[in-house]
Amino acid sequence: MSVDRCVIAVIEEIYDAALDETRWPEVLKKLTDFTGSQVAAFWVLDGSGEPRLPAFTYINLDPKFIQEYLERMAPIDPTVRYLVGHPKRPIVHDGLVITEREKDRHPYYNWHGRHSDTRFRMVAQVRLAPALQAGVAMHRTRRAGRYEAADIERFTVLYPHLQRALVIGSRLSSLGAMQQCTTELLDRHPAAVLLLDGHKRIIYANRSAEALPLNGDGIRLSANGISLPCKGDNDRLQRLIAQALAVIGLPAATSGAMRALRPSGKRPYGILVAPVSKRYAALSTVRPAVCIVITDPEDQRPLPHQRLQAAFGLTEAEARLAGLLASGEELRSAAAKLGITYGAARARLAEIFQKTETCRQGQLIKLLLTTLPTD
């Protein structure tokens, strides 16, 4: 393969890895060939405290050696410490970090030499955020020899592409992490949350929303959107959705709310319809336009008593009583559920008032519900 074709092949692989980080071993294989190296690693470096490498992909190294390196030796590695101190230097090599004579006396290189025959290193790095860097490290053995100026210059040709690829990969990974976090939080929310696109089609439903059709109590979800069995309720819901779509982007856009009857005769659902769309990136395949939040007044989830204990310094008995009251129980029924007398419940409630700095049951319940999530 010609030099130009080899460079192009490495660059293509680098951009592939930006979109799929499982491709980094393939990048490292091509980089070892391109640079005349024997070992290579892709790494992420967190220098906010003691240096650590939360991500480390490698080829041609012993896994036990790498495990010990990551657990004990990385913080004293002179190259790692140099990278932390010089996050904006694009290419780092041994000549910038340490002399060969110093290597012979350094405890890190004494350890390194007992486990690996690599001796020379050349690194390309990108600063992705404060105290966060990423890059690739190439290693040569004593026999292969150090990286000379021509090797470094050749490696530098790849740097702009590596920089762009790492920035792209960082942005995509960050978006993916935020999406995962958001999804997990929404799935834990007791309310049903739906996102509709501009055609009223459902493009997202949290766990509570997915469960709604299963209970057979009036909420219908399909490829065409959401509907209600009562014609009057359904007409109103569709009007609220249409109104939300009509005011997208307006600064004074407001939400609409309604209640929906249930075939079971249980208390009606509460439904909030709000516009959420703003300007999306041209290539975005997901374009939420309307958010629908459905609450079920019958879904009374008690506050975990452990959280009440931790937040307000309550005893376990006090926390259990407070949790029942916050879930809508009257004091007498809460006492019955706990197997205590009404008088004992009143005395316990007085202690709860004192610890929460409240004086009325309504005030207490408001404090509990607005301070701690139910799930």
Image (tube, helix red, strand yellow):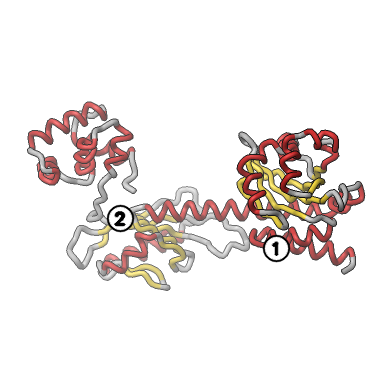
The x, y position of residue 120, in whole percent, is: 82, 46
The tag earlier along the polypeptide, 2 or 1, is 1
**Which residue is the extreme one toward the front?**
114
Describe residue 32's horizontal placement relative to residue 44 as left or right: right
Residue visible at 82% across and 51% down in the picture: 140
The x, y position of residue 371, in whole percent, is: 33, 38
Q: Secondary structure at mark 1?
A: helix
Residue visible at 11% across and 43% down in the picture: 339
Q: In the figure, residue 233 lies in which quadrant?
A: bottom left
Residue visible at 67% across and 45% down in the picture: 128
For badge 1, the amino acid type reads Asp
Describe residue 344's horizontal placement relative to residue 369 as left or right: left
Front position in the image: 75 or 201: 75
Distance from disc 2 to disc 1, alpha carbons, whole Å, reads 44 Å
Q: Quadrant of the N terminus?
A: bottom right
Q: Which residue is labeled 1 in the image? A: 16
Q: Secondary structure at mark 2?
A: strand
Residue visible at 48% across and 64% down in the picture: 197
Describe residue 330's horizontal placement relative to residue 154 as left or right: left
For badge 2, the amino acid type reads Thr
Q: Which mark is residue 228?
A: none
Describe residue 196's horizontal placement relative to residue 15 as left or right: left
Residue density around tag 2, few if under 14, some if 14–19, many if 20 or more, within 10 Å:
some
Front position in the image: 290 or 355: 355
Q: How many marks?
A: 2
Front position in the image: 266 or 247: 266
Q: Is residue 68 visible?
A: yes
Q: Which residue is labeled 2 in the image? A: 295
The x, y position of residue 279, in whole percent, is: 57, 56
